[in-house]
Structure formats: structure tokens, C-alpha cells
Image (tube, grey):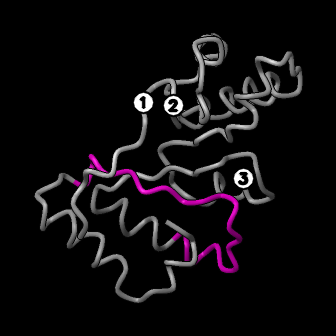
């Protein structure tokens, strides 16, 4: 979801309604906040996330590390996951010391904050083993599985 969706007045009720309609436990739903989008009002986003967290929904920050708001989000939003931007995952197998160091740093920060990490763009066994060796909790990418469009729409 885009942080801009928080300005839609009935969005929280819409999300809750979808979960209820399809009988999905909110704890099984992770809403992704796209880190690349800018947030004009962090307190509005904080309230939005807190309201849905209270209902049991979980949150991830997508493309973490790609923009200027990464650590601001961690400071103010009670997120459950950070999805490490795939550019870092891809770079790690090219011998990128910067990419390796960034991933190690994010894993350390996330552990301290009790937040799980997800490495994006896992496209090969080599990338998978590299991020696994750095302590990343979960992986996402074509090596793991292709996306599916078989889910019902709300």
C-alpha cells in the first residue's frame, strides 16, 4: 500500500472488511508500506498503522534502505518486518562490500528492535546463501517462487 492511502477516510474499514469477508485472520495479513513514497504527515501514518496493528494486522516497510525515510519509519511506526531493498541483495554476489555491510547493519538494527528482515530479489542459490549467511530471516524473489495472481479481489 502507498502511504498516500492513509488519507482515504474509509481505508481502515475497507481493509478490515476484506479480512472479515474472506475469513482471514488479520495476523495472517502483512501490509507493505512502500518506502520509496514520501510521507508528508508521519503522525497520520503512525495513527493509521497503530489502528490496524490494534486489529491484529502486521506491517512491513518495502524497499527498505532505498529512500530517505527508512529510519524515520522505524522510529515512529510499529512495523513487524523490513524488506531490504533488492539492490543490496543483488550486489552482494558481485563482491559489493557496501552491499554486504548495509545488509549486516540492517540485520543488526532489526534484531535489536525485534523486527524480522526479508531480503528482496533472491534470484539465485548464490544470493540466497549469501543473505542467509548474514542472518536475514526471510527471502523473496524468483529463486523462491514466482508471483501468483490466483487470489480473489475484495
- The numbered dot on residue 145 is 1
Q: Is residue 154 left or right of residue 143?
A: left
30 falls in the magenta region: yes
Q: Classify mark 2: residues with Cα within 10 Å, few (<14), some (14-19) or many (20+).
A: few
Secondary-structure class at tag 1: loop
Give the extent of the magenta segment.
26-46
| Residues at marks 1 and 3, CA–CA distance in whole angstroms | 27 Å
| Residues at marks 2 and 3, CA–CA distance in whole angstroms | 25 Å
Residue behind mark 3: 70
> Where residue 95 sits: x, y (%)?
86, 15
> Where residue 39 sits: x, y (%)?
67, 73
Q: Is residue 61 left or right of residue 80?
A: right
| Residues at marks 1 and 2, CA–CA distance in whole angstroms | 5 Å
37 falls in the magenta region: yes
> Where residue 121 sits: x, y (%)?
61, 34
Residue behind mark 2: 142
Secondary-structure class at tag 2: loop
50 and 40: which is toward the camera: 40
**90 relative to 149, above or below:** above
Q: Are marks 1 and 2 in contact (CB under 8 Å)?
A: yes
| Quarter-of-image position of residue 53 | bottom left
The mark nearer the N terminus, 2 or 3, is 3
| Quarter-of-image position of residue 154 | bottom left
**7 relative to 150, above or below:** below
Q: Residue at x 33, y 52 (%)?
A: 149
Q: How many numbered discs sit on the rendered protein?
A: 3
> Where residue 69 sits: x, y (%)?
74, 59
Q: Classify mark 1: residues with Cα within 10 Å, few (<14), some (14-19) or many (20+).
A: few
**11 relative to 118, above or below:** below
**71 relative to 49, above or below:** above
Residue that protrudes farthest toward the bottom in the picture: 9
Amino acid at each position: 500500500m502507498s502511504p498516500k492511502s492513509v488519507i482515504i477516510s474509509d481505508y481502515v474499514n475497507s481493509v478490515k472488511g476484506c479480512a472479515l469477508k474472506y475469513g482471514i485472520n488479520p495476523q495472517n495479513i502483512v501490509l507493505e508500506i512502500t518506502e520509496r513514497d514520501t510521507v508528508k504527515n508521519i503522525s497520520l501514518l503512525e495513527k493509521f498503522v497503530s489502528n490496524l496493528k490494534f486489529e491484529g494486522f502486521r506491517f512491513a516497510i518495502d524497499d527498505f534502505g532505498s529512500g530517505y525515510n527508512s529510519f524515520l519509519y522505524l522510529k515512529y511506526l510499529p512495523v513487524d518486518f523490513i524488506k531490504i531493498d533488492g539492490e543490496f541483495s543483488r550486489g552482494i554476489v558481485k563482491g559489493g562490500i557496501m552491499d554486504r555491510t548495509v545488509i549486516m547493519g540492517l540485520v543488526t538494527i532489526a534484531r535489536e528492535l525485534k523486527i524480522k528482515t526479508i531480503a528482496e530479489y533472491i534470484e539465485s542459490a548464490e544470493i540466497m546463501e549469501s543473505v542467509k549467511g548474514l542472518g536475514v530471516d526471510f527471502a523473496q524473489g524468483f529463486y523462491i517462487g514466482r508471483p501468483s495472481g490466483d487470489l480473489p479481489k475484495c
